[in-house]
């Protein structure tokens, strides 16, 4: 936000800037439901909200045009159901744009001149936004082609929706048989609200339902407008309890709200289906996500827990971070107790260490996360003497978000070769004196090194380096190599189940009838780590070793 | 009260890593070729890592459909794992719809750890039969192995889907889409497709 708060005052000079921000109502793959539109309000910038992939493409072009016109950034606010939807998209003509650098007078120039003239620089710049940009933004919103009114004029009930909710409303109206009977304002630009369109919309209506994700952003701003436009209008939405205040919406939720307002009957399930759900759902077990078969993170966690068991009888404080290895918190590994946000692990560990608590403190941070936000707090740890052990979970990719490269991979986001930045050299340059690299598939070696790191009197780093198993399989496939699953010898397996209860690779399946472990050949990639764990030497490679 | 349906709604359920997202892309691409507006939404945790994944494939001749199929809205549910198939069928299958499912369980970690029990596959199928007019079931991995690669399980299920005649694009179009998408794995994939199709045709005739 800091750079944006400045850019919004100074403006862009020349060129254009579009900020695409993906919000995640329901937190499908996030830990919060941030609503970027509120940032748009704070920044006093336009916010566009496409409802599907086609509009996302088309509105991006609009966003650039608006940005050029206003000399200010434009926010393209997306939600999960726009980002995670694939659909057919029709392209317009693709313009070839000559890109050349342009020199323009410096911001500071204008800034100091203004400061000299007005003796109050910041309010001057802010005042300019309200005087010049805001009225223009309002005009753009009133003329924005994606702020669309669908009404005949004789409706009494209307719905205002934004983004993907436009589609839910359409479908809910159709499910309830209310098509054409309810006025609908589909809004593609929600900051600022198109006041003239809204005035026209509410003019003949008695009641309006607002459907939006996630905060009541339109609802609040609409209330402010209605005070003058139509104070008697009945407004339904999040604050009236018709639409939930958190979580993702869908067609059913909208249909329920409309049913409540109109008195139309609606239920998600028929009696028959409801009773089948009641009968069978309890028998279906949950399926929590877990680290992949062969995942090097699992081996690292296992080895670290062994080391901690030896050092302190298993007493420790573990702090995780954001990435696949975040899954190390679940059973049977239960490798750490705390996790906050991307890059939070080392900072949290620092804080815990400075309380003077007398148990080993171990932080797990992914290679990509380390580059993103781990380095300043590692310097803090080394400089301020926080006795923590940091394990860099170096799987060679940014796995969780789709195997993107990072600065140690040797190629850029566009696939261009680049110089590899060494994690170990960075750690040493941060002032850490204990820096070792291990291969997590070597369980014993990893355990010994982590133990040494935990015993080190200052901050220490162990880099657990082994390619992500899923990326490995992808690369093998490209080379025509198929994984060779390991085998459990039923003669030797005693059924102690240690491989499952302490390690828990998903390829290790417990056969309840035989009371032995077996290996699921569709999942096992032949990493061989479980073979190092089995106390009875029952697990071996297809070749027998 | 339910208004007239304007979309063809198909769901593919499975476990992350089974290839159901790729399978849904194939169906989606073929439907676009066949002249439909298509949207594919996905509900998933972290799909690559063993969680439940469901693709919502919606096709319409008119407007682009919303990304998620409403409850009881799916004309067809296809599943690569029997418990995941039922999870989806219970909430989404339109009574009288069609189900195609694999019968080979992928055991969730909770079950291996002894914290939960995996239901009997026969019981899962019985529940599906209570809602569906037709349930086609077989082990996708057995057929995929016969085709030459376990990775082709998702192609087996597409073959079976094409046999139902319930989606408005023909078998050849699906096969063409598959061949173009993975030229190097073309042979295995198409073999898997055929095996799935033959098995489904056999079961459809048997009824
Ligand atoms: C501030 C922030 N930016 C981006 C993300 C999205 N994100 C989640 S996991 C992840 C990558 C993690 O990569 P890495 O640390 O290498 O771990 P891996 O998944 O490879 O184990 C990203 C970028 C986020 N959660 N928070
Ligand atoms: S994608 Fe890679 S890093 Fe992530 S859980 Fe799977 S093997 Fe581990």
Image (cartoon, rainbow, N blue to C red):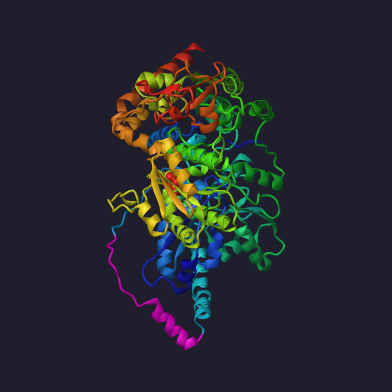
Q: Position of residue A541 (x, y in %)?
A: 38, 24
Magenta highlight range? A97-119
Q: Is residue A117 magenta?
A: yes
Count of numbered marks: 0
Rendered position, A89 above or below B199: below
The answer, for residue B60, to whether it is visible in the render is: no
- Against B13, residue A220 (above or below) is below
Residue drawn at the location 68% of the way across and 39% of the way down: A266
Measuring from the top left, give residue A302's x and y in whole percent: 49, 37
Q: Nearer the viewer, residue A61 or A404?
A: A404
* Residue A238 locus on image (x, y percent): 66, 53
Q: Image check: A171 left or right of A133? A: right
Q: Tell me if residue A389 can be seen.
A: yes
Q: Nearer the viewer, residue A21 or A306?
A: A306
Residue at the top extreme? B206
Q: Is residue B180 left or right of residue A320?
A: left
Task: Note whether A149 is above or below A284 in the view shown.
Answer: below
Identity of the residue drawn at 71% across and 54% down = A240
- Residue A289 at x, y percent in the picture: 52, 37
**Of the pair A45 and A280, the residue shown nearer to us:** A280
Q: Quadrant of residue B114?
A: top right
What's the residue at 53%, 78% (across, down)? A127
């Amino acid at each position: 936000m800091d750079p944006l708060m400045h850019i919004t005052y100074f403006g862009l000079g020349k060129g254009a800037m579009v900020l695409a921000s993906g919000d995640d109502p329901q937190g499908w793959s996030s830990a919060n439901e941030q609503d970027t539109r509120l940032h748009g309000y704070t920044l006093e910038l336009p916010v566009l909200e496409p409802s599907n992939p086609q509009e996302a493409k088309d509105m991006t072009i609009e966003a650039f045009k608006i940005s050029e016109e206003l000399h200010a950034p434009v926010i393209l606010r997306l939600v999960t159901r726009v980002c995670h939807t694939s659909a057919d998209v029709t392209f317009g003509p693709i313009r070839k744009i000559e890109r050349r650098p342009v020199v323009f007078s410096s911001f500071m120039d204008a800034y100091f001149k203004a400061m000299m003239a007005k003796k109050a620089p910041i309010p001057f710049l802010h005042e300019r936004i309200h005087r010049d940009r805001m009225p223009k933004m309002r005009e753009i919103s009133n003329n924005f082609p994606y702020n669309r009114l669908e009404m005949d004029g004789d409706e009494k009930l209307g719905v205002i929706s934004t983004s993907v909710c436009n589609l839910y409303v359409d479908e809910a109206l159709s499910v309830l048989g209310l098509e054409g009977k309810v006025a609908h304002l589909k809004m593609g630009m929600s900051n600022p609200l198109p006041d003239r369109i809204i005035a026209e919309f509410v003019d003949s209506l008695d009641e309006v339902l607002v459907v939006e994700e996630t905060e009541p952003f339109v609802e609040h701003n609409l209330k402010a407008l209605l005070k003058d436009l139509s104070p008697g209008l009945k407004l339904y939405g999040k604050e009236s309890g018709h639409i939930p205040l958190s979580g993702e919406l869908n067609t059913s939720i909208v249909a329920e709200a409309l049913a409540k307002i109109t008195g139309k009957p609606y239920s998600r399930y028929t009696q028959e289906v409801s009773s089948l759900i009641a009968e069978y759902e309890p028998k279906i077990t949950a399926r929590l996500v877990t680290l992949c078969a062969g995942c090097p993170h699992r081996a690292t966690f296992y080895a670290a827990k062994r080391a901690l068991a030896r050092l302190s009888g298993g007493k420790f404080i573990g702090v995780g971070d954001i990435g696949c290895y975040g899954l190390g918190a679940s059973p049977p590994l239960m490798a750490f107790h705390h996790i906050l946000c991307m890059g939070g692990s080392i900072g949290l560990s620092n804080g815990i260490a400075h309380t003077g608590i007398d148990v080993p403190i171990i932080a797990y941070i992914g290679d990509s996360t380390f580059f993103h936000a781990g380095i300043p707090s590692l310097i803090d740890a080394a400089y301020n003497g926080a006795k923590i052990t940091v394990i860099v979970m170096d799987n060679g990719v940014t796995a969780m978000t789709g195997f993107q490269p990072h600065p140690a991979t040797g190629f850029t986001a566009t696939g261009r070769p680049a110089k590899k930045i060494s994690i170990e050299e960075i750690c040493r340059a941060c002032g850490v004196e204990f820096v070792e690299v291990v291969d997590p598939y070597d369980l014993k070696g990893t355990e010994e090194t982590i133990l040494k790191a935990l015993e080190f009197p200052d901050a220490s780093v162990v880099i657990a380096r082994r390619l992500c198993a899923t990326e490995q399989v992808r690369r093998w496939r490209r080379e025509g190599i198929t994984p060779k699953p390991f085998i459990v010898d039923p003669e030797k397996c005693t059924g102690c189940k240690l491989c499952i209860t302490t390690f828990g690779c998903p390829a290790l399946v417990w056969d309840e009838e035989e009371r032995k472990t077996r290996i699921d050949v569709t999942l096992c990639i032949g990493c061989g780590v479980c073979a190092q764990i089995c106390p009875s030497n029952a697990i071996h490679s297809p070749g027998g070793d | 009260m339910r208004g007239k349906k304007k979309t063809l709604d198909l769901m593919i359920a499975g476990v992350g890593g089974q290839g159901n997202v790729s399978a849904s892309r194939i169906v989606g691409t073929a439907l676009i070729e066949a002249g439909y507006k298509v949207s594919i939404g996905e509900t998933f945790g972290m799909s690559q890592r063993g969680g439940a994944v469901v693709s919502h494939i919606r096709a319409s001749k008119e407007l682009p459909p919303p990304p998620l199929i409403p409850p009881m809205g799916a004309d067809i549910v296809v599943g690569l794992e029997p418990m995941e198939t039922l999870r989806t069928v219970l909430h989404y299958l339109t009574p009288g719809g069609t189900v195609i499912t694999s019968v080979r369980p992928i055991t969730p970690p909770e079950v291996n750890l002894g914290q939960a029990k995996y239901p009997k596959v026969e019981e899962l199928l019985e529940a599906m039969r209570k809602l569906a007019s037709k349930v086609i079931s077989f082990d996708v991995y057995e057929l995929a192995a016969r085709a030459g690669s376990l990775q082709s399980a998702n192609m087996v299920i597409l073959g079976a889907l094409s046999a139902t005649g319930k989606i408005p694009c023909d078998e050849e179009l699906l096969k063409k889409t598959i061949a173009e998408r993975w030229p190097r794995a073309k042979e295995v994939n198409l073999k898997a497709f055929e095996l799935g199709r033959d098995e489904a045709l056999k079961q459809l005739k048997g009824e």
